[in-house]
Amino acid sequence: MADATVSDLVVSRLADWGVDRVFGYSGDGIDGVMGALRRAGRPEFVQARHEETAAFMACGHAKYTGGLGVCLSTQGPGAVHLLNGLYDARLDSQPVLALVGQQVTSVLGSGYQQEIDLVRLYGDVCAQFVQTAYAPEQLPMLLDRAVRTALATRSPTCVILPHDVQTAPAPDLTAHEHGIMVTNPGLPVPELRPRADDLRAAADLLDAGQRVAILVGQGARAAAAEVVELAEALGAGITASLLGKPVLDEALPMHTGVMGHLGSTASSTLMSECDTLLIVGSNDPWSEFYPAPGQARAVQIDIDGRRLGMRYPVEVPLLGDAAATIRALLPLLAPGTDRSWRQRVEGEVTRWRDIARQRATAEAEPLNRQYVLHALTDRLPGNAQVAVDVGSVTYWYARHLRLPVGVDAHLSSTLASMGSALPYGLAAKLATPHRPVVALAGDGAMQMNGLAELLTVAHRWRDWADPRFVVLVLHNRDLAEVSWEQREMEGDPRFVDSQRLPDAPYAQWAELLGLRGVRVSTPDEVNAAWDQALSADRPTLVEAVVDPAIPLLPPAQPYEKVAAMYAALAREDTDLGRRALAHLRRERATEGFGDPR
C-alpha cells in the first residue's frame, strides 16, 4: 500500500502472526488502528460492551484456542478497564497481547487529558513485556517481541501506541542501518523432556509408593491418555484442580473429581490418605487440601520451572511437557500388582457420587440450584463448549456437571473474577461458531456485566453456523458465595444490605433482545428447559429461580471447621437462615457427620 501507515503495519503484522480477531472498544486514542482494521478486513474486530469484557474475551480466546488473544483499547479510562481481564490472563497463564493507545508523544509528561503513565500502570500485569513505541521503525520489532514473549511465557504483554506514531508513514521493512532492528514473526514450539537421571529418580519414587495420588491441572490438557495409562500402571487415584476438570473423563472409576474447597469428599480422602503425590501441570493454590507436609513424597511435572515445588514440597521436580515426560516415564515403572489402594479410591468415588445425587435431588424452596447443573450432565452436547462464571455456580459446576470427553470448559480460576462467563462464551463461539456454547452464571455476575454482553450475543448470533448459545442464570437475589463465606470464615450472619441483589427479569430481557427466554422454578420444569434451550433456533437464556439457602460446604471437614457456620446461622432470625441451617445439617449428614445441635 503506497500510503500505508504504522497502523497498517500493526494490523498486517498481527495477521502474519495468525491473529484471527481483535477484541476491544473504539476511542480517539486508537483511531489510526481502527482505520487500518477497516481497510484490511482482517483480523476481525469484535466490539465488546466494555474494555474489561474485551480483555476477558481475549483471555477466553487464548484458553479455548490455545493461541494468542488480542485486545485493543484507547488511552486513559479504556486502558484502565483492560486491567481485570489482563490479570485474569496473567494468573491463569494465558498469552494475551494488549494494544493500547496513548496521547501524542509531544504532550506526554504535561498532564494532558487522559494521559496516564501506561508503562507504570501495566508494569505488573504485563511484567514480561510492556513498551511504548516512540518511532515508526520500532513497531515490527516491538510487536514481534510482544507476541513472542506472550507465547513463550504464557502471560499478557502490552504495546503502547501514541497517536502520532500510529498515523505516521509505515517504515521501510528492508532498511539495513545502525539503530534499526529487523525481526520477523514466528515461534517454533519445542518438546521439552527432563534428564534421564531425573526420570529414573521419579520412577523409583513412584514405584515405592503404596498409595499414589495424581493431581492434574490445565497443563495436562494434551496428556489425558498418558495420565490414564500412568494411573493404571501405578494403581493410583486421580483428582483435578478446577482448571484441570476438563482434562480427563470424570466417569473414570478412579477419578475423584475436583479437589479443594469446592471439591468432592473423594478427592479429600485421596489427598489425606495418599503416601505419594504426582502433580501434573497444576498450580492449584488450595494448599490446605494437599497432603500434609511430610505425609507424601512428591513428583511434579511442569513446563514452567518457576512452578516446581511452589505448592508442595517436591522431592523430584521434572521440567518438561506433560505428555512427553509421562511417555518417557512409563517404561521405567515396575508393574504393580496390589490394587487395594485403587479399590479404596473407587469406593470413595462411588460414595461421593451418591452424596452428590442426594444433595442435588433434595427439596428446596423453590428449586435446588445443585439440581439444575446435575440435570445438565446427561443433556450437554458432546461438541459443546462451557464457560463458567465465579460464585456459587462454580461449586455446582465443579461437583455436579460431568463433562463429556472432548467438551472444553473454562473460567476465571486464579483471579476468580465475576463477570467472565459471557465474554468467555462469546470468545469460544466466535472461534468455533459451529459448536454450541453453554455459559453458567449467577445473578450477581449477570448483573455485573452479563446483561450488557447479552446484547453482543443478540447482535452477532445470526452469523453463527450453530445458533445455540445457552446462558444459565441462577436467580436467587443473593451474592450467595460471599454470604456463605461470611458465615464460614468470619462467623458472621448474612449482611442483607451487602448481599441482597435487586430483582431482575432475566428471561424477559432475553426475549426483549429477540432471543429465547425460559424461566423455571420447580424441579419438574428443569429437564424440559434444558431440552428446549439446547434445541432452540437461537440463543436462549434459562432463568432458574433457586434457593440461596443451599450451603457452600467444603468437603470432609471436622465439626470445629464448620462450627462458625452454625453459630452465624443461629444468629440469623429469618426464614432463610432457618432453612440454611436445616440444609447445612442435612448436607453434613450425607457425609456421615452427626453434628451437635
Image (spheres, rainbow, N blue to C red):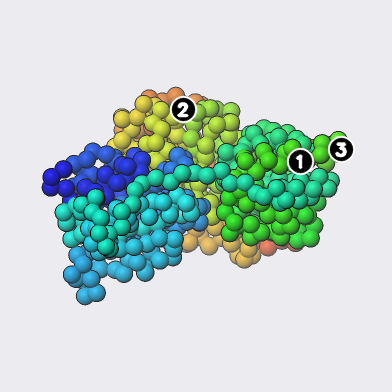
Q: Earlier in the sequence, mark 2 or mark 3?
A: 3
Q: Is residue 104 visible?
A: yes
Q: Earlier in the sequence, mark 3 or mark 1?
A: 1
Quadrant containing the C terminus is bottom right
Residue 185, image x and y in percent? 36, 46
The residue singled out by tag 3 in the image is 338
Q: Nearer the viewer, residue 597 or 508?
A: 508
Q: Earlier in the sequence, mark 2 or mark 1?
A: 1
The Cα atoms of the two marked residues, 3 and 1, are separated by: 18 Å
Tag 1: amino acid: Leu
Q: Nearer the viewer, residue 118 or 383?
A: 118
State yes or no: discs 2 and 3 in contact (Cβ < 8 Å).
Answer: no
The residue singled out by tag 1 in the image is 332
Q: Residue at x 42, y 38 (%)?
A: 428
Q: Nearer the viewer, residue 315 or 459?
A: 315
Q: Residue at x 45, y 58 (%)?
A: 87
Q: Residue at x 23, y 62 (%)?
A: 135
Q: Is residue 98 left or right of residue 527?
A: left
Q: Residue at x 58, y 28 (%)?
A: 378
Q: Is residue 450 visible?
A: no
Secondary element under disc 2, as helix, strand or loop, is loop
Tag 3: amino acid: Asp
Crowding near the residue tagged with mark 3, few <14, some 14–19, many ≥20 C-alpha atoms within 10 Å: few
Crowding near the residue tagged with mark 1, few <14, some 14–19, many ≥20 C-alpha atoms within 10 Å: some
Asked if residue 129 is positioned above or below residue 389 in the image, the reply reads: below
The image quadrant of residue 326 is top right
Name the mark nearer the viewer: 2 or 1: 1
Q: Residue furthest bottom?
A: 110
